[in-house]
Image (cartoon, rainbow, N blue to C red):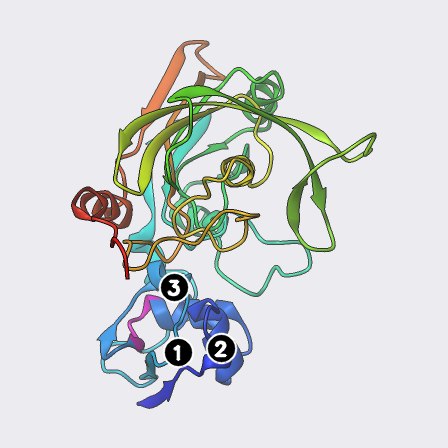
């Protein structure tokens, strides 16, 4: 087994990125294969693909056991070991609803098609024995956001579903854990956001920025903890990173958020956190493209977020020095 200790300079990097740079992997796709086959160790314990987004800390001991017994590669080395991550909530002739785990991107990024396994690839593998099977991406959620994602299985169903999203009629409800307490306990977040292609981030738009688009969501505080809150957020629009940006703009970044914090204070010392943003696509509702009937699906909180909430209920901030 190869073994390394993370340096101060590398602290904060994603585990998969760190391994891709530190080893001969050359890409996160290869690292994803290693994670899926139990070849990667953190602190002496094997970790899987769900930990790809873990932010390494100085002093972390990372191991790589390439010839671990039972982990030999196959012709489908990228997809096969990750089949267990796929949870299909519903499928029929027109559409498919999938519960995406954190750490998995929905579809390849432009120009980086061969760098990592995606949810689309796992679904294509899932339907590989169906004659003339087709899949169309209807909408997306962020890599480190978990929860429900909708796919169409015919071109006409895709058009019908995308028309609904364009008209802002689907129900898209998320569970988020944020720093502090949003005030009031319920309300509407409304901003003009512009995507910066250079930094790959959203920013609040000013003046007559041609790239600016409306970002609207309603929220309700569902549970208050000593230093954080569980918030239910319903999207009206669906801009990239929208909930993460809008929460942070109001001084309440998501717990585990590594990109959008703006001027928010850091999380208190010792406060429970996640190695990804605490955001879960919980409920998804829309009109079925074939039957015309209302369809609604929910996804339980994944173990990491459920565990975070339990820890936050018990956490008490330190007082004084």
> Element at badge 1?
loop
Mark seen at residue 10: 2
- Where residue 199 appears, x then y in whole percent? 69, 55
Q: Residues within 10 Å of mark 2 (few under 14, many from 20)?
A: few
> Element at badge 3?
loop
Q: In the image, is residue 266 part of the stretch drawn in magenta?
A: no
Q: Which residue is mark 1?
A: 58
> Element at badge 2?
helix
In the image, 198: left or right of 87? right
CB of mark 2 within 8 Å of CB of mark 1? yes
Q: Residue at x 42, y 70 (%)?
A: 15
In the image, 185: left or right of 213? left
User: Of the residues under marks 2 and 1, which one precedes in the sequence?
Assistant: 2
Magenta stretch: give its range: 36-41
Q: Residue at x 32, y 36 (%)?
A: 229
User: Of the residues under marks 2 and 3, which one precedes in the sequence?
Assistant: 2
* 79 or 195, nearer to the observer: 195
In the image, 166: left or right of 38? right
Which image quarter is the N terminus in? bottom left
- Where residue 65 appears, x then y in whole percent? 31, 84
Q: Which residue is mark 3?
A: 54
Which image quarter is the C terminus in? bottom left
Count the marks: how many? 3
The Cα–Cα distance between marks 2 and 3, rounded to whole angstroms, is 13 Å
Mark seen at residue 222: none
| Residue 212 in view, yes or no | yes
- Where residue 84 appears, x then y in whole percent? 29, 54
Q: Quadrant of residue 38?
A: bottom left
């Amino acid at each position: 087994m190869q073994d390394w200790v993370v340096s101060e300079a590398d602290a904060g990097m994603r585990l998969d990125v760190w391994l891709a740079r530190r080893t001969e992997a050359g890409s996160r796709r290869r690292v994803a294969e290693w994670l899926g086959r139990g070849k990667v160790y953190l602190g002496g314990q094997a970790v899987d693909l769900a930990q790809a987004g873990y932010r390494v800390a100085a002093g972390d001991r990372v191991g790589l056991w390439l010839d671990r017994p039972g982990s030999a590669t196959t012709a489908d080395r990228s997809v096969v070991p990750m089949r267990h991550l796929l949870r299909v909530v519903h499928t029929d002739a027109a559409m498919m609803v999938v519960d995406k785990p954190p750490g998995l991107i929905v579809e390849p990024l432009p120009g980086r098609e061969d760098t990592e396994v995606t949810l689309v690839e796992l679904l294509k593998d899932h339907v590989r024995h169906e004659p003339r099977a087709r899949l169309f991406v209807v909408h997306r959620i962020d890599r480190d956001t978990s929860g429900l994602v909708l796919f169409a299985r015919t071109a006409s169903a895709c058009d019908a579903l995308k028309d609904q999203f364009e008209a802002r009629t689907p129900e898209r409800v998320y569970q988020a854990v944020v720093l502090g307490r949003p005030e009031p306990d319920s309300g509407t977040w409304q901003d003009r956001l512009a995507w910066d292609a250079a930094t790959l981030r959203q920013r609040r738009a000013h003046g007559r920025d041609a790239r600016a688009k409306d970002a609207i969501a309603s929220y309700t505080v569902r549970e208050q903890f000593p230093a954080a809150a569980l918030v239910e957020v319903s999207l009206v629009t669906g801009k990239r990173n929208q909930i993460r940006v809008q929460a942070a703009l109001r001084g309440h970044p998501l717990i585990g958020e590594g990109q959008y914090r703006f001027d928010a204070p850091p999380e208190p010392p010792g406060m429970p956190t996640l190695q990804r943003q605490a955001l879960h696509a919980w409920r998804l509702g829309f009109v079925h493209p074939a039957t015309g009937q209302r369809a609604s699906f929910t996804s339980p909180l994944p173990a990491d977020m459920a565990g975070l909430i339990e820890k936050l209920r018990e956490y008490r901030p330190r007082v004084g020095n």
